[in-house]
Amino acid sequence: MKYIKKKVKLTTKSKNIFNILYETKKYKMKNKIEKLKAISEPNRIRILMMLRQKPLCVCEITAVLGLSTATVSKHLSVLNQSGFVKDTKDGKWINYSLTPIGEDLFVDDLISYLIKWFSNENLIKRDFEIVKTIDREELICSPNKCSL
């Protein structure tokens, strides 16, 4: 059976609609891939798991992870830009917390999977215990590390 290829001439209006639909789908896919890239780093997963407990400042996260302040700040920046965390100023502190549920359903789904997949990891359990006892007032947090 032969199929006849028929050329369809698209009008300018239909081309624009097609391009908008294509770009929208492409953006959604690209956006999701960027979110997946953001959580492809183990320390970022640890940060997200810690933030499930309570909002934390850079100094607290640094103390738990044992990384430099600059490295933790970069991880938080990536997580913030990809929609996983938000920051709020509280006096001299900048607290980081998970983005509120419902703000981005894809992020909500990813966080729920991370909880399911990583909650029983020994490192995550250890981080959880440290976060329960950490006191930012006892840490040596300079204004440069925990504030704008």
Image (cartoon, rainbow, N blue to C red):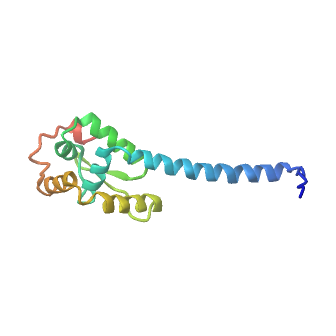
Q: Is residue 106 rendered to the left or right of residue 77?
A: right
For the residue pair 20 and 115, the one nearer the viewer reads as 115
Residue 71: percent from the left, percent from the top? 28, 36
Residue 91: percent from the left, percent from the top? 23, 49
Q: Is residue 60 rendered to the left or right of residue 100?
A: left
Question: Residue at position x 30%, y 39% from top?
Answer: 73
For the residue pair 3 and 8, the one nearer the viewer reads as 3
Residue 93: percent from the left, percent from the top? 23, 47
Question: Residue at position x 33%, y 38% from top?
Answer: 74
Return the residue found at the far front.
1
Which part of the image, by quadrant, shows the C terminus? top left
Which part of the image, by quadrant, shows the N terminus? bottom right
Residue 143: percent from the left, percent from the top? 20, 38
**The quadrant where residue 37 appears:** top left
Please determine whether, in this image, residue 6 is positioned above or below residue 65. Answer: below
**The quadrant where residue 125 appears:** bottom left
Count up the numbered dots.
0
**The quadrant where residue 67 appears:** top left
Question: Residue at position x 23%, y 51% from top?
Answer: 56
Return the residue found at the far left.
138
Please determine whether, in this image, residue 33 is positioned above or below residue 143. Answer: below
Q: Is residue 23 rendered to the left or right of residue 94?
A: right
Return the residue found at the far bottom.
102
Question: Residue at position x 86%, y 50% from top?
Answer: 11
- Asked if residue 84 can be seen in this view, the reply is yes
- Asked if residue 89 can be seen in this view, the reply is no
